[in-house]
Amino acid sequence: MSQPNIKSTIFDNIRIVLCQTSHPGNIGSTARAMKTMGFKNLYLVQPDKYPNAQATAMAAGADDVLDNAIVTQTLSEALVGCAFSIGLSARKRYLSHETVNAREAALQANKIVASQPVAFVFGTEMSGLTNAELDCCQMLAMIPANPEYSSLNLAMAVQLVCYELRMTILNGALEPTSNQTNGDAPTGEPLATNDELERFYTHLEETLLHIGYLNPNAPKKLFERMRRLYSRARLEKEEVNLLRGVLTLTQAPRKHTKY
C-alpha cells in the first residue's frame, strides 16, 4: 500500500465526539477546526440544538463535516466500533484512568489507529465529561494550559488535539509498524471494540450479581472500579471472548468429570 493511502486510513480512523453540546456555534466551529486539520468524522451525543443555522455559519465552509455528522442518543452508540477512546478534561480527575497530555494522547493513538478507529471525546461546555462518560473511555487527556486561567473554548480544545494528531501523523509517528512486543506497542491482535467491551461489562455485572459479589441495592461504586480495572488492560477481542467464557461457566458451572 502506498504511503498516502496509509495516512488517509489513519485520518479516517480518528473520530471526534462531542457530548451534550449546548451552543450550536461550537459544533460548527468544531467542524471547521477538524477540516482544517484533515479530519472528518464528527459524532454528536445529544446536542442541545442541531441542526442549527448558527452551526452552519460557524462551520465557515466545513459544511461537509457538519452535514455528515452522526447524532446519537448515548456515548456508547457514538463509540461503536472504536477500539480506544480518550476523554478530554480541563481539570484533574481523581479517577484511576491513565492521564496524559494532549501530545502524549496523540502518540498513544499510534498503537491502534493504523488499523482500528480511535475516538477523542469532549464533554459539555460548562462541566466537561461526567464520570459516567469517562467510564466509557480508556484514557484521560488534558491540555496543559495556564493554571491561573485554563478555560478553553470547546472548538479551541478540539483544534489543539487535532493539531497534535496531525503533526504526529505527518511526522511519521503514526506509521504502522511490524508486530512489537515491548508492552506498549501492538502485538498484532485487534483490540476489543467499545461495543464488545460494553457487552462484556453487562455480562460481568450480571455474573457478579448472580454470585453475590455485588450488592444489588448499591452496585455502582464497586462496579465502576471493576470497569476501570479492565479498561486499563486494553483487552484484545480474543481476551474478551475468553473472559466471557469464564463468566458463562461461572453462572452455570459444568459438572466436573473425573479422568
Image (spheres, helix red, strand yellow):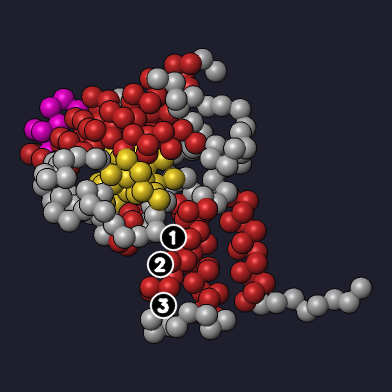
Q: CA distance from mark 3 to mark 1?
A: 15 Å
Q: Secondary structure at mark 1?
A: helix
Q: What amino acid is labelled 1 in the image?
A: Arg
Q: Secondary structure at mark 3?
A: loop
Residue found 50% across the figure and 36% down from its top: 111
Q: Nearer the viewer, mark 3 or mark 1?
A: 1
Q: Is residue 247 left or right of residue 69?
A: right
**Of 22 and 243, the residue lying toward us:** 243
Circle on res. 228: 1
Q: Secondary structure at mark 2?
A: helix
Where is 125 relative to 220, above or below? above
Where is 173 relative to 97, above or below? above
Q: Is residue 72 left or right of residue 7?
A: left
Residue found 22% across the figure and 32% down from its top: 159
Dots 3 and 2: beta carbons under 8 Å?
no
Residue 51: say if magenta: no
Q: What amino acid is labelled 2 in the image?
A: Glu
Q: CA distance from mark 2 to mark 1?
A: 6 Å
- Local crowd at mark 1 within 10 Å, few (<14), some, or many (≥20)? many
N-terminal label among 3 and 1: 3
| Residue, disc 2 | 224
The image quadrant where one finds the C terminus is bottom right
Magenta-drawn stretch, dominant element (helix, strand or loop): helix
Residue range in magenta is 55-62
Dots 3 and 1: beta carbons under 8 Å?
no
Q: CA distance from mark 3 to mark 2?
A: 9 Å
| Residue, disc 3 | 219
- Local crowd at mark 2 within 10 Å, few (<14), some, or many (≥20)? few
- Local crowd at mark 3 within 10 Å, few (<14), some, or many (≥20)? some
Where is 245 relative to 61, above or below? below
